[in-house]
Every structure is written in C-alpha cells, then in structure tokens.
C-alpha cells in the first residue's frame, strides 16, 4: 500500500497547511497591498505601461557633499578600501560586474533582466552601488573615464527600462538606485553642467522613479524594505525642490512610526538579524547627515534610534570587528561594522562609540579627512561587560577580555510575526570565538533563491542547537516564508565572580505531536570551559534528538576517546567532551542523504566544514550535552536526581564544578 504522505493529495494538503500557518501571521493590510501590487504589475505588463519621465525639473544635490579630490588618495586607514574600489571601478569600465561571487561580462548594455543570474544578483546590477567606486576613480585622477562609464550605464538603464516591468522597477531597487544616482549627480556636477542633453534625460528619469517609488512603498513587506524606501524618498524630496510627491514632514512622520516599532528598546533591529541591523544603521546615519546638511531639522527624528542601534552594534561586535553570522547575515557584503561605528561616533560626536582606528570609505564619503582627524583624537572605548543580556532582541553575550574570547547565544523569537523573510530555525543556537578566532560558527547564508540550499541554511540542523525528530523548530519554507514558529520561553541568567550563565527555553514544536520543549543551560567558566546542557520535556518519547556543533571551515576534529575530540589547527588546545549521548557522527561537505557540513559567510560562496552531531533517543526530562574546554579535557558526569532535575559534575584539573538544574533555573558552584 502506498504511503499516504507521499501521495499528491498529501502534498497539496501540506502546502495548504503551510500557506495557512504563514498567512495567519500577516496583517490584513499587508495582504491587500500585495494583491494590489500584483494586480498593478500585471496590468502594466499587459498594457505596456511606460515609465514616467516628467520634464523641466532641475535637481539639487549639494547637500550630499562629496569629499574634495586628492584627499582620498592620501595616507589613511581608507587606503586599502580605496585600492579595492579602484580595481572594481576599472572592471566596471571594462563591462565586468562581480558580486555575490559571480562575475558577468557585458557588451554595450548590461543584462538588466538576464534570467541566467539570480534575482539578487540582478538587483545589485540595478542598485548602481558601483557609483561609489566610480567616484573613487574620479577622485583618484580619472574623472573623464569615471563620468563616461557612469553616463553609459545610466543611459543604458533608461533606454532598456522604459516600461514598468522587470527588476528595475521594484521599489527596493529604485530606493537604492535613486540615492546612488543623486550622489553621482553631485560628484559629477561639473560634467553634468557641460552635458545638458544627458542631464535633462537623467533628471527626468530620477523624478519619474521617485514619483513611482512614493506611490509604491512596500507596505506589503515592511521592515527593512520600508526603511530603504523612506531613505530613497527622503533624499529625493531634498533633491527635487517643489516636487508634488509629498511633503518631507509626512515622510519623516512615517520614519518616526517605523523606527518606534523597528528599533527595539535594547537597540536591536526587530528582524533580529545582525547583517540587516548593520545596513539599517548605516542608512539612517547617511540620511541624518544629509538632512543636517540640507538645513532640515528633521534629523532629530533619527538620532535617538541611531544612538541605540550603535550601542547595540558595539555590544554585538566580535574581537575581529565582525558581527555574528546569525540568520541571513553575510560577513563580506561591503559594510564594515567598525567603519559604521566610527561613522556613528563622528555623526553623534560620541567618543564612547569608537572601537578602534577604523575609518573606511563609508566614513570617508560622509566626513572626509576632517572626520578622521576628529576620530583620531578620541581614545578607544571598550565598555562592553563580561556579560550582556539584550532581552528585547534575544541575545546573550559572554566574554573574557583577557584571552579575547566571546560567546553569543540567540534566545529570542525568530522574526517579527508578520515578517519571516530572514528567519532561521535557530533558537538557542550560538557562536563561539576563542583567542580571537571563530571556532563554533553558524552555517550562514548561501543564497536567497528557493531550493535545497536555501532550505538547508535556514534549517535547524544548520545551527548549533537541537533538532527533535528530524524536524525544524520553525517551519521555514520557500525563500522567505515561515509557517509555525519557535516560541522562546523565559530566560534566566547569573553573573558570578569568574563565571556567567544563561538558560533559555525553546517551545519550537508547539502544535505538533508531543509538543516537546527544549531547555538549554549554558555556563562559561572564565579561562576554563563552556558547558552546554540540553534537556527535552514533553511527550516526545522515542524521537531522535540531535545536537549539532558546526566548526569554522579551517578547523577539524580528531577523536581521542569515545566521548572526546580535540579541535585541530588552533594555537592552543581546545576539547569537546560529550556526555550522555548515545552516538556521535562527524560530517563534512555532505549532499546525501541530506545536505550537511557546509559554511557560507558570503552570498554565492560555500565551503565544507566539520559538523559534530550528537544523538540520543528522547526520554522526556532526560538531558545530554557537551563541554568545550581550554588546554585540557574535562571529565564530566551527569546524574538525574528528579523527573526534571539534573546534577552535572565537571572535573577540570584539580578543580570540581557543579551545575544543578530543575527544569527551569540553575545553580552553579565550584
């Protein structure tokens, strides 16, 4: 007899269930807006609706204030980025475009809607972010080549995108492009004034794009997309005096409402994604700078959010000046966290935000050499605590500054209820840095296109947490959707003299058979070890429970005993000692029977890495886990003293440490 779960009827029922549990989280306004947008796009495509091109408009861009020529080629911390930007600009001049680890060579016209490339790749083509590189080329002594390249690409875009269809007319790409085009208009002001015919066509296109954007703000998506739209509208309103698009006061009112929701009390962005937090913060600083220079007092709407977000970013920053690779974060996307913090410090005149003499092109483009001179006068400030709890965003950070060691635990909700696009099934996952080197890592994000790789990188098994019964905590599906979601429970923490600990709860399988609850207790004994203790409660008897430990791709494991492994390729010994696990398996670069053991810190680039999977059969209330120890192995013994209570003894050198748990809460002693 055929298994019903494999029949077409079962597939349809499952798809219907996924849609139901996804749609029920959305606001009705989102659904209505999406239906209207889809209908409009269909009508525009069928009728061949042409792009708006108003005439007789002069752009005002002086508030964008491009730094003086010559400074950018001088000595400073931006030199390395300048060389890279010059290389990219010369590649663009030759028709070579490379991002997301894929290169394309085009002739007269780039493939603006070339389906051979992913949608995200095409979006980058439409963003015109390479304008920033062309400006560096100009400031480095090649103004004619820089302007000619920009002029050619802008004319091509206008000529090839005359109808309201394709990626170029998505509100998100317009939001990015309109800002980059206006920056180009200011940078090439002299060339524009001598090129009247192109200037008029260009100005008409900018105004038409801005008007289209104002009428099509992404209220169906909201989140960082809507903030990106508002950035584009704000810059356009300042650049197009007397336009009929609306008043700046209205736009700033929307900004204020969105920031009140999207910037949480602890300073984190509400999508709980460090990468998007970084991008939103950078954009807000830019808008604040431009509003100030335009003589508009509305920048005060942004300043409070910028300060909170900058303080949050500083707390999340790792010792290598990079952010944790959580959810849809990518580490090499051209935005430096240290650079953004330096920019925030100069913008807010806040020395306490300085984390080092980091001052790249992002800061230079806004404040030039004068900003760098101010930053240099301030001392480096590191007010980060040994333990930081960010309760609204759902992150715990435990550090030991003496040996450059830090751990970040994600104990918060996976996403805003109505915005699951960048959610992963990663509740109670963590990353670990030891001696300034990443050791236990998140798997990252490889691509946004729907398919097995997107499914893997969002799955529970791609993170350093538990999977029960082979299922994901949150039902992530398609590219950006999530049905039933993991629910975080109460969090407790304690900060001792030489240790700190936190306990989080994942009700990630509510509504499913058994409704198991995962409780993770994590202890950091400074200079010695980390304890990761996992207990599963609920009616899940007989289900396999898997705990995953993903290592950085340049590290490997060597088995020492049945329950202990040495982490290789480190300057100092580091050990993993498992306890109460029935079996262990080491996986690297697997594609079958399921994808496992892959790491991607940048879009389009994946490499194999070692993953240790510890497994036991679920016995409600039972616990297992592991200890990661410095210098020597730890001896571990666990006893179950009640249906919900455990005592864990760790012998480390001549010392004995004891962890007691009783379902919720813990006690730790030496």
Image (cartoon, rainbow, N blue to C red):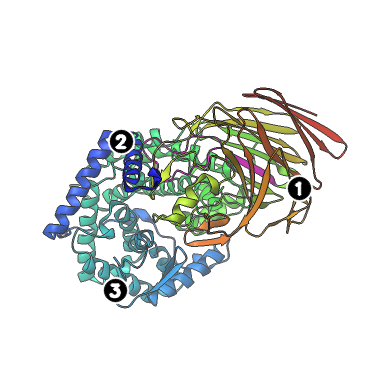
Position of residue 57 in the picture relative to residue 426 (left or right): left
Indicate which disc, 2 or 3, sits on the residue closer to the N terminus.
3
Indicate which disc, 2 or 1, sits on the residue closer to the N terminus.
2
Q: Position of residue 627 (x, y in %)?
A: 72, 41
Q: CA distance from mark 1 to mark 3?
A: 61 Å
Q: CA distance from mark 2 to mark 1?
A: 62 Å
Residue 561 appears in view: yes
Q: Are marks 2 and 3 in contact (CB under 8 Å)?
A: no
Residue furthest to the left in view is 47
Viewer-proximal residue, 284 or 67? 284
Question: Where does the magenta region start and end?
Answer: 405-429
Report crowding for label 3: few under 14, some 14 to 19, many 20 or more residues within 10 A (C-alpha): some
Viewer-proximal residue, 264 or 139? 264
Q: Is residue 146 magenta?
A: no
Residue furthest to the front in view is 1
Q: Secondary structure at mark 3?
A: loop
Position of residue 469 in the picture relative to residue 670 (left or right): left
Residue that numbered label 3 is attached to: 109
Q: Secondary structure at mark 2?
A: helix
Residue that numbered label 2 is attached to: 253
Viewer-proximal residue, 411 or 176? 411
Which of the image's four quarters has the C terminus?
top right
Query: Of the residues tagged 1 and 3, which is closer to the observer?
Result: 1
Magenta stretch, overall SS:
loop
- For image coordinates 55% across by 27% down, the residue present is 538
Residue that numbered label 1 is attached to: 562
């Amino acid at each position: 007899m055929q298994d019903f779960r494999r029949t077409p009827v079962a597939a349809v029922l499952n798809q219907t269930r996924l849609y139901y549990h996804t749609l029920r989280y959305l606001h009705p306004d989102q659904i209505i807006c999406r239906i209207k947008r889809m209908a409009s796009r269909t009508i525009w495509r069928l009728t061949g609706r042409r792009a708006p091109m108003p005439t007789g408009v002069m752009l005002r861009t002086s508030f964008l204030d491009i730094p003086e020529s010559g400074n950018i080629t001088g000595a400073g911390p931006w030199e390395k980025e300048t060389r890279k930007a010059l290389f990219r600009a010369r590649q663009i001049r030759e028709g070579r475009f490379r991002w997301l680890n894929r290169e394309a060579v085009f002739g007269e016209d780039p493939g603006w809607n070339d389906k051979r490339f992913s949608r995200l790749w095409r979006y980058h083509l439409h963003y015109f972010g390479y304008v920033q590189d062309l400006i560096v080329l100009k400031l480095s002594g090649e103004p004619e080549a820089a302007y000619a390249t920009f002029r050619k690409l802008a004319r091509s875009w206008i000529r090839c995108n005359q109808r309201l269809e394709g990626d170029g007319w998505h509100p998100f790409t317009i939001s990015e492009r309109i800002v980059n085009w206006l920056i180009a208009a200011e940078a090439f002001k002299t060339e524009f004034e001598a090129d009247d015919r192109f200037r008029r066509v260009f100005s008409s296109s900018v105004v038409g794009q801005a008007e289209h954007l104002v009428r099509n703000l992404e209220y169906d998506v909201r989140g960082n997309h809507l903030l990106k739209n508002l950035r584009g509208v704000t810059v356009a309103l300042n650049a197009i005096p007397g336009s009929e698009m609306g008043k700046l006061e209205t736009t700033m009112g929307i900004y204020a409402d969105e920031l009140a929701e999207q910037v949480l009390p602890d300073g984190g962005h509400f999508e709980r994604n460090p990468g998007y937090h970084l991008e939103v913060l950078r954009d807000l600083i830019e808008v604040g700078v431009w509003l100030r220079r335009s003589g508009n007092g509305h920048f005060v709407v942004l300043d409070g959010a910028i300060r909170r977000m900058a303080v949050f970013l500083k707390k999340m920053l790792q010792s290598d000046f990079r952010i944790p690779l959580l959810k849809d974060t990518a580490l090499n996307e051209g935005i430096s966290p240290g650079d953004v913090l330096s920019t925030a410090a100069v913008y807010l005149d806040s020395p306490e935000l300085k984390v080092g003499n980091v001052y790249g092109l992002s800061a230079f483009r806004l404040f030039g050499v004068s900003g760098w001179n101010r930053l240099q006068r301030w001392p480096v400030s590191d007010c980060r605590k040994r333990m930081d709890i960010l309760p609204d965003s759902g992150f715990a950070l435990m550090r030991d500054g003496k040996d450059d060691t830090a751990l970040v635990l994600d104990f918060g909700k996976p996403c805003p209820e109505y915005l699951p696009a960048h959610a992963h099934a990663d509740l109670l996952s963590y990353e670990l840095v030891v001696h300034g080197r990443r050791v236990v890592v998140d798997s990252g994000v490889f691509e946004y296109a729907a398919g097995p790789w997107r499914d893997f990188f969002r799955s529970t098994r791609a993170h350093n947490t538990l999977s029960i019964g082979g299922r994901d905590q949150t039902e992530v599906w398609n590219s950006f959707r999530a049905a039933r979601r993991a629910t975080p429970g109460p969090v407790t923490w304690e900060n001792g003299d030489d240790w700190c600990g936190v306990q989080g709860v994942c009700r990630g399988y509510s509504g499913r058979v058994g409704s198991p609850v995962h409780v993770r207790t994590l202890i950091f004994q400074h200079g010695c070890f980390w304890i990761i203790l996992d207990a599963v409660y609920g009616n899940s008897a007989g289900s396999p429970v898997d705990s995953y430990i993903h290592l950085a791709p340049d590290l490997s494991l060597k088995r020492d005993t049945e329950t202990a492994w040495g982490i290789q390729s480190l300057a100092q010994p580091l050990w993993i000692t498992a306890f109460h696990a029935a079996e262990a398996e080491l996986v690297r670069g697997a594609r079958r029977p399921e994808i496992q053991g892959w790491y991607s810190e940048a879009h389009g680039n994946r490499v194999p890495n070692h993953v240790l999977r510890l497994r036991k059969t679920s016995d409600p209330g039972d616990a297992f886990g592991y200890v990661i120890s410095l210098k020597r192995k730890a001896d571990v013994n666990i006893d179950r003293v009640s249906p919900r209570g455990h005592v864990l003894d760790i012998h480390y050198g001549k010392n004995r440490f004891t962890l007691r748990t009783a379902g919720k809460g813990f006690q730790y002693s030496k």
